Image (cartoon, rainbow, N blue to C red):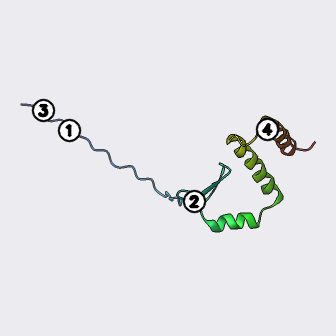
Amino acid sequence: MAKEKEVKTEEPIVEENKVEEPTLGEPIGILFDTMNYYKNEDLDRFISNLNQEQALYCILQACQSAFKRNAYNITETELLSKAIRVVSSPTN
């Protein structure tokens, strides 16, 4: 007579009070390989309300993105690298 094995089934784990966060899905565009946007209205609002700090960030990201795409020669790369360090470093 063969013994039957008792199979235990575990109760599913239910997380209480879990709130699902909304997902944004896939971005419709990526600016300079770093900034995603999901609606054209958001991009238009960002451009319309661009402040000085955001503008500088965009310029720096554009330079770095173009460098990754081999858009500059060695002299231009040297100059841009120095310029980025100058504008990125905190003032003393």
At label 3, the amino acid type is Lys
Callout 1: few (<14), some (14-19), or many (20+) C-alpha neighbours within 10 Å? few
In the rendered structure, are the residues bearing label 1 and label 2 in contact, judged by CB atoms less than 8 Å apart? no
In the image, which is nearer the foreground, mark 3 or mark 2?
2
Residue that label 4 marks: 77
In the image, which is nearer the foreground, mark 2 or mark 4?
4
Between marks 4 and 3, how big is the CA–CA gap? 77 Å
What number is the disc on residue 3?
3
Left or right position of 3 against 35: left
* Residue at 75%, 53% in the rendered image: 58
Query: Which quarter of the rendered picture does the C terminus lie within?
Result: top right
At label 2, the amino acid type is Ile
Residue that label 2 marks: 28
Report helix, strand or loop for mark 2. Answer: loop
First along the sequence among labels 1 and 2: 1
In the image, which is nearer the foreground, mark 4 or mark 1?
4
Between marks 2 and 4, how big is the CA–CA gap? 30 Å
Callout 4: few (<14), some (14-19), or many (20+) C-alpha neighbours within 10 Å? some
Query: Which quarter of the rendered picture does the N terminus lie within?
Result: top left
Between marks 4 and 1, how big is the CA–CA gap? 70 Å
Report helix, strand or loop for mark 4. Answer: helix
Residue that label 1 marks: 6
* Residue at 72%, 43% in the rendered image: 71
Between marks 3 and 1, how big is the CA–CA gap? 9 Å
First along the sequence among labels 4 and 1: 1
* Residue at 76%, 46% in the rendered image: 63
- Residue 89 horizontal/vertical position (percent): 86, 42
